[in-house]
Amino acid sequence: MRDAREAISGDVLRKNRSKSMPIPRGIRAFLTPVLIPCLFWSGVSSKFNVYHAVYQGQRYGNLSLELKVENFEECHLKCVMIKASQACYAFNHNEKDGSCQLIHNGKSHLVPSTEYQAYVQFLCLTDYPRIENAEESFDGWTGKHPAPRGGMVNFSCKHPRGFRDGQKDHQATCSSFVADAWCATFIENEKDLCPPPQSCVAEYPSIENATVTYDRWDGKYPAPPGSSVIYTCPHSSRFNDGSDVHNATCSFRIDDTWNSSFQDRHVRCQDANVTDAHYHIDTGEVVECRMTTMGMEYRGTRNQSQTGKECRLWAENYFTADITTIRDDKNIFSSPNEQYLQVIIKSLDLNYCRNPTMLARPWCFVLGGTLDWEYCDIPFCSGREGLRSFDL
């Protein structure tokens, strides 16, 4: 129960101060106020300013003035009898050596101290709890300390999914019952309560039986924009669309989406003995046609471009080093990350037409100037036509 007795003598002040208890920030359930007569030198009026003993084991650190006094009463009188232009919001007193520290600033931090007892008016001198990445607005005050009792901070999260605990908004309020205490609707310093606006909280798309590695993040949410998930199949098998590798990247847009190389298509890893429906290791048969528009599944032996030019070897370092610069007329090339490229380049066969960079259809480098390349004329499959024997 709060002791609100007016202190007239030093004995009563000390008696009241001895009742103070450790008060954790935000949940201070017990507090001993010290009522100090505030006498103005004008002699025409007087009023009482109430200073409360707070923060046992800590003191205010943003000091304005430090001096020596004979006793506690002199310290609090130094604080309350300051000129009107310099309000004294709080003070620290060391009873052992007579040190008196005055706090005129409207905002202060706390420092550990076993020798001092801190006293403060009924307001919030310490900073309010914050939520990283959240936007703030103020109700009942301007946001400039000290905060009055009942002063509120409103937090909103601009991420598309809002706060991770499902709340639409959060608040922190300067307590009306405990001096210099903030009451919040959230746990202070809770990590990632409000994800950055450009980040992915939603789970990345999954691929059945695929092995997953992470690029530019640790797999913990929220995923930063540009971070990737790399999908590969075990035992050197391929995906059912003929691809060796797939990826998903957290979007740079504020939409909490993953952009993947397979989008909504049902992609899965195939059995190691059968890489796809058109390339059978057991029978040694290779399809000389493509099943899809992009033809990423094509594993045939066509090695001439659509104009009849001979394809150059993929293994030539000059080409593989600059493969990410290839564009088509429609500029639909989707640049894979470095790990994705390394896996794809290792799988390229001799000088056969392939589509390792998700262009419109299979292509290859041809003889000519720097980075000359052309599309290959790979026909679409119709049933099992085009299937021929291939000597492994």
Image: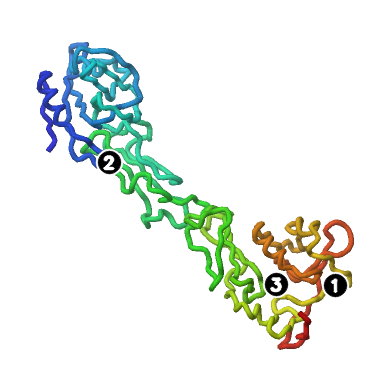
The location of residue 197, given as percent across then percent down, is 50, 51
Residue at the (32%, 18%) spot, across then down: 86
The image quarter containing residue 235 is bottom right
Q: Amino acid at mark 2?
A: Gly
Q: Which tag is nearer the camera, tag 1 or tag 2?
A: 1
Percent x, y of residue 347: 71, 68
Q: Within the image, what quadrant is residue 140 found in?
A: top left
**Residue under pointer 3:** 296
Quadrant assignment, res 178: top left
- Indicate the secondary structure of the residue bearing disc 2: loop
Q: Is residue 297 above or below residue 327?
A: below
**Considering the numbered disc 1 on the image, is that residue within a helix, a strand or a loop?**
loop
Quarter holding the C terminus? bottom right
Which residue is label 2 attached to? 26
Q: Which mark is residue 160?
A: none
Q: Where residue 310 sits: x, y (%)?
A: 87, 69
Near mark 1 (Cα within 10 A), the count class, few <14, some 14-19 or many ≥20, is many
Q: Which one is earlier in the sequence, the residue at label 3 or at label 1?
A: 3
Residue for point 23% across, 18% down: 80
Specify the amino acid type for callout 3: Met
Vertical placement of residue 33 versus 171, above or below: above
Mark nearer the viewer, 2 or 3: 3
Instruction: Specify whether 390 is left or right of 45.
Output: right
Query: What whole-number distance in Å separates the C-alpha atoms at marks 1 and 2?
Result: 74 Å
The residue under the point 80% across, 67% down is: 364
The location of residue 78, given as percent across then percent down, is: 24, 15
* Among the two numbered marks 1 and 2 on one chain, the one whose residue lies closer to the N terminus: 2
| Distance from Cα at disc 3 to Cα at disc 1 | 17 Å
Picture residue at 24% right of the left edge, 34% below the top: 179
Residue 304 is marked as: 1
